[in-house]
Each structure stands twice: as structure tokens, then as C-alpha cells.
């Protein structure tokens, strides 16, 4: 007889744009209670989901479900790194980059079905100065936009585009010293993104060929470009063709050191944080267990 899975679902009630009030009832309806024992808890403050997930690991819980956006996934996932407890995702955020990369449905009911029929795989995660992230961590223009977006009164894709347009008009690119596995280069960059997964979210592919099982970080370096080139960059971002643009170079490595002139904001899995001038990125190959759809392609 198949062993029952012990599952803890953590709901972030303030993530994304919609209400989470119907999620507990949906869990009761969708999740097979003959195979699974499910408990539900609401996170109450920043960092709370991480604390709950740490306790779940200590209690031997099989799967912890992050119900929220990429920030919630980061909080939960960072507590599960290097453990036997698997991460599951029900995407309810603004971008949902990791869920999209892993082909998890944006429909909550279908995402919850993965708890019944999904498989546990081992995937890479990255660290920035020792802090785990699972999707992307970037600096430059996109970090400035993330910072502005976080202070807006509303969420969603349209709000993000408005923040990006207003930030573009005043943003000044910086100089960076980049060391990729010992190979050094100096760049004046508009954006630098260190990527474990392929996209920011909303199907915007900043590292189109990134996979989460190759033991490598994809580093996308975008040089400054004029306003007239913005539509082309935007189209290539969403068509998964950014690597073809003359303003973009994509490198791969296991250890990336980036130095800039001063402390500044970066974004980590979509959330802006103030970070020091020197940043060290490292990959942890297949360091986290994630529950994914059974039909997941091999190149994810």
C-alpha cells in the first residue's frame, strides 16, 4: 500500500492580485485525501513562511506547498534546500517565474492536481552571498523597476510595464567588473541577470536556454540601447529570442563574482533588496526537491 504523504500548505494572503479566500476549500476538493494528509496555514508577516517551512522540515513533512508569488516560493524553498522535504507551488503572484519555468499551471485547481499525480525531481538553486534564490537575481535597470514596482499601490503586469517605462526615462547604466569562473571582463551594462531558471515571470525570457538541472548559472548581460530599440528588446524577451540581440551576451558558469562601485538595490526572485557592491553567485547542483507535473520535459 502506498505511503500517505504529509503535506503542509502555506498560503500568503497578500501576494499577487487576487483573493486567496477560496484556496482552502479548493485544497479540500482537489487533493486526494486517501493519499494525502494536508494541513493549511496562513503566513502573517514577511519571513513567516520561511519559519513555518523550517518547522515542517523538522517535523518530517513530505511536501510543503508555497501558495503565493515568487517571493513566497523563495521564502519556503530556501528553508527546504538540502533537505528531503519537497517544494510544491501553487502560483498566485504577479509574475510566477519559477512555476512557469516548471510548467506548473497558472490555474490553482490544476496546480493542486500535481499533489496527486506529480513527481519529485531534484533541481538546482543558486546563492547570492549565501542567500538562496531559485529563478533570477539581477541588478541594473530591472532591479530599479522591481524596487519601484514594490512601492506601487497596485500589482499586476500593467502596473509593472508602467513602472518600467517611467524608470527607463531616468535610468543611468553602471560599470561592472564581472568574473565568470576566473574569466574577467569590465562592462557598462543596462541589466545583468544571474539566472537559474529561464524567465523573470509572465513569460519574459531573460535567459532563454537556462535549465535547472545543468549545474550552471546563465548570466545575461544587456548593454545600453536607445529608446527606438525598446520594442525589439521587448519582443525578443517574450519570444524567447533575447540571445539573438546584438545588445545582449549570455554566459554560463558555476561561480560568478560581480563588483560595482557602490551598494545598491538588486532583485532576488522578483523582490528588491539592498545589497553590497561585491556579489558572489554560486550554483548548488540538484540541491532542492520540487514536486512537478509528470509530463515535465527533460530540458527544464
Image: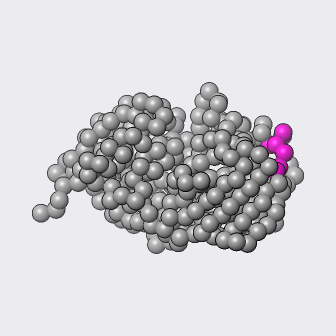
Q: Position of residue 226 (x, y in %)?
A: 87, 52
Q: Residue at x 74, y 56 (%)?
A: 259
Indicate the quadrant containing the N terminus: top left, top right, bottom left or bottom right: bottom left
- Where, by quadrant of the figure, is residue 224 drawn? bottom right
- Identify whether 160 is placed above or below 223: above
Was residue 137 drawn as part of the magenta stretch in this picture?
no
Secondary structure mostly taken by the magenta-highlighted segment of the chain: loop
- Where, by quadrant of the figure, is residue 162 drawn? top right
Q: Position of residue 165 (x, y in %)?
A: 77, 40
Q: Residue at x 28, y 54 (%)?
A: 62
Instruction: State the extent of the magenta-drawn residues as a range.
Output: 168-174
Q: Indicate left or right for 164 with 49 as reference.
A: right
Whether residue 291 is visible, yes or no, is no
Residue at the far top in the pictured view: 153
Whether residue 176 is visible, yes or no, is yes
Nearest to the observer: residue 61 or residue 171: 61
Q: Position of residue 208 (x, y in %)?
A: 63, 64
Was residue 170 drawn as part of the magenta stretch in this picture?
yes
Residue at the far left in the pictured view: 1
Q: Indicate left or right for 143 with 136 as reference.
A: right
- Identify whether 279 is placed above or below 150: below
Q: Position of residue 37 (x, y in %)?
A: 21, 47
Amino acid at each position: 500500500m502506498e505511503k500517505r504523504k504529509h503535506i503542509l500548505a502555506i498560503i500568503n494572503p497578500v501576494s499577487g492580485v487576487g483573493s486567496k479566500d477560496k484556496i482552502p476549500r479548493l485544497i479540500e476538493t482537489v487533493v486526494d485525501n486517501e493519499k494525502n494528509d494536508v494541513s493549511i496555514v496562513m503566513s502573517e508577516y514577511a519571513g513567516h513562511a520561511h519559519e513555518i517551512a523550517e518547522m515542517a522540515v523538522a517535523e518530517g513533512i513530505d511536501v510543503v506547498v508555497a501558495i503565493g508569488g515568487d517571493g513566497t516560493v523563495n521564502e519556503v524553498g530556501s528553508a527546504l534546500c538540502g533537505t528531503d522535504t519537497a517544494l510544491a507551488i501553487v502560483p498566485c503572484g504577479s509574475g510566477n517565474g519559477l512555476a512557469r519555468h516548471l510548467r506548473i499551471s497558472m490555474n490553482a485547481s490544476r496546480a493542486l492536481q500535481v499533489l496527486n499525480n506529480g513527481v519529485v525531481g531534484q533541481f538546482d538553486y543558486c546563492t547570492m552571498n549565501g542567500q538562496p534564490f531559485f529563478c533570477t537575481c539581477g541588478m541594473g535597470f530591472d532591479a530599479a523597476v522591481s524596487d519601484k514596482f514594490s512601492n506601487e499601490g497596485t500589482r499586476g503586469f500593467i502596473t509593472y510595464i508602467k513602472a518600467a517605462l517611467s524608470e527607463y526615462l531616468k535610468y543611468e547604466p553602471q560599470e561592472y567588473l564581472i568574473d565568470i569562473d576566473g574569466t574577467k571582463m569590465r562592462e557598462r551594462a543596462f541589466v545583468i541577470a544571474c539566472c537559474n531558471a529561464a524567465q523573470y515571470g509572465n513569460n519574459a525570457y531573460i535567459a532563454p536556454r537556462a535549465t535547472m538541472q545543468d549545474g550552471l548559472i546563465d548570466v545575461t548581460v544587456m548593454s545600453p540601447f536607445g529608446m527606438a530599440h525598446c520594442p525589439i528588446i521587448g519582443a525578443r524577451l517574450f519570444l524567447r529570442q533575447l540571445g539573438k540581440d546584438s545588445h545582449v551576451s549570455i554566459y554560463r558558469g558555476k561561480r560568478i563574482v560581480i563588483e560595482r562601485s557602490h551598494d545598491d538595490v538588486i532583485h532576488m526572485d522578483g523582490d528588491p533588496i539592498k545589497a553590497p557592491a561585491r556579489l558572489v553567485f554560486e550554483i548548488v547542483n540538484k540541491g532542492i526537491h520540487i514536486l512537478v507535473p509528470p509530463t515535465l520535459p527533460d530540458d527544464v
